[in-house]
Structures are given as C-alpha cells and as structure tokens.
Image (cartoon, rainbow, N blue to C red):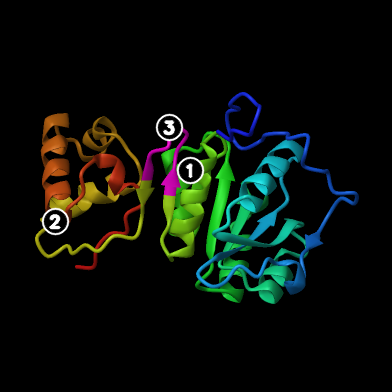
Amino acid sequence: MIETAGSAPTHGVGLHHRSLAHPATAGTSLYSEDDVPADGTGHVAVVLGCFAELLGLGLKKLLGEDRNLRVLGVDIDRTVLQHAVESLAPQVVILDEVIVRELSILGGLKAVRPTMGIVVLAHHPTASYATGLMADGASCVAKDISGAGVLAAVRIAADGRRVFADVDGHMVERSRPATSASLTPREIEVLEYLSRGQSHAEIAQALQVGVETVRTHSAHIRSKLGVRSKRELIGLAIPPQ
C-alpha cells in the first residue's frame, strides 16, 4: 500500500497520483548518468520494466521518492531490456510477470549481469510459482503488497538474495546457509516437497505415510536447518549431501 499526502491508503502499488506527470511518449525511457542524482555511494541502482499504466505510475513514484535508490531507467520494453541492463548496469531490475512468462528472459538477463537482482511482480503468486522463479534466480513479489514490501524486496535482491513476498507481507528468503549432514534420507525427501510449497497432507499422500509423520519430519528439518516456520523452507535449495 502506498500512502501519499492528502490521499487515502490505496492497496497495492498501482496508485495513480495526480502530481506525477504521465510520460509524453510511450515506450522506453532511459535516464542518462547526468539525470541520476549525485547522492553519493551505497545507493541501489534500479531499472524498471514496462507495467500497466496505473501500476507503472505507482512504482515510478515509489522508487523515485526513496533516496536510497537511483532509478536509471523506466518503462523498459522487453525488446531492449537486455541491452538496457548491459548498458546501464543496474543492481536490480523490476519486471512484470507478463515479461517473464518465457523463462529464457531471466536466463538472458543473468547471462549479461550474473550478480544483478531480479524482482518479478505477480498477481496473487502461488508458492509453486514463486519457487520456480527463485530457482531461476529471481525474487517474486505480490502486486498487492505494500510499497514498503516492494522496497524491502528490492534491497534483498540487491544484496544477492532471493525472496518470496506474498500479499500479507510475509517474506521467505531462499538463500540460507544450511547443511544436510544431520538430515536423514527421509528428511531430505520431505524437504524436497516442502521447498516446493506442498502441504503436509500432500506430502503424506505422495509418500504414503501419515500426516503426523510428515509433521514430525518437518519439525526436525526446521530444527536442524535453523528455520522457524514451514514457510521459510519454500524455495530453499536442497543442501548438498
């Protein structure tokens, strides 16, 4: 939710703010280095892809008002996205789910800038969808999340980590130091299902065991890997054996 002076709270980041002028020309809008505020070091350089009008306006306002960010480009069309990333060298690129329906887009961007964070905004993303994106090197953020949630996800992505931020603001990070040394073969098997966001009941059915047995394995896994909830296992890479 973005709140602006004199306005009521609006859910999501698709906020149309009257003081934000609509670009005179549609399509790619790149800022030159001279257009970027000389606000010192330690700021996150961001490129914003194309979004639907209201959502795009809200995102541009949100990013532009954060002094910890340097917005290098906005409304970047998919046809020039890879070139823009290569030439502008951002730390994070923010994309609409529509653009990344072909996962080759992510691969192409990672090939150009392997260390760059990618944040994908999606409409009511499921755990399995988010897990797939995280496995391909991108973070997944619900479009209805608060503005603060979007900014938090951008900072996490800039730090080289991946996150799933759902609509209620809960965040699950993928990158987490872990070892499988203390996990039993069955626990590793259960962890594979948990990392894909499957429920205890679904796992029990797949493994032909009782739900309570799966809950016990899940509790042991969380304890051994040092995570607090089952949600935090979503997208977690299976530790090497």
Left or right: where does residue 15 sit relative to residue 19? Answer: left
Question: Gap between marks 3 and 1, in whole Å?
Answer: 9 Å
Question: What's the magenta region?
Answer: 164-171
* Residue sitting at the far right: 24
Q: Amino acid at mark 3?
A: Asp
* Residue at which label 3 appears: 168
Question: Gap between marks 3 and 2, in whole Å?
Answer: 34 Å
Q: Nearer the viewer, residue 212 or 146?
A: 146
Sequence-wise, the earlier of marks 3 and 1 is 1
Sequence-wise, the earlier of marks 1 and 2 is 1
Residue 169 on the magenta span: yes
Q: Secondary structure at mark 1?
A: helix
Compared with residue 210, is residue 59 higher up or lower down, i.e. above or below? Answer: below
Residue 219 in the image, given as x and y percentages of width and height: 13, 42
Q: Secondary structure at mark 2?
A: helix
Quadrant placement of the N terminus: top right
Residue 87 in the image, given as x and y percentages of width and height: 71, 76
Q: Which mark is residue 185?
A: 2
Q: Going 69% across and 54% down the picture, which residue do you hit?
A: 49
Compared with residue 188, is residue 1 higher up or lower down, i.e. above or below? Answer: above
Neighbourhood count class around disc 2 (C-alpha, 10 Å): few under 14, some 14–19, many 20 upward = few
Residue 209 in the image, given as x and y percentages of width and height: 15, 35
Residue 68 on the magenta span: no
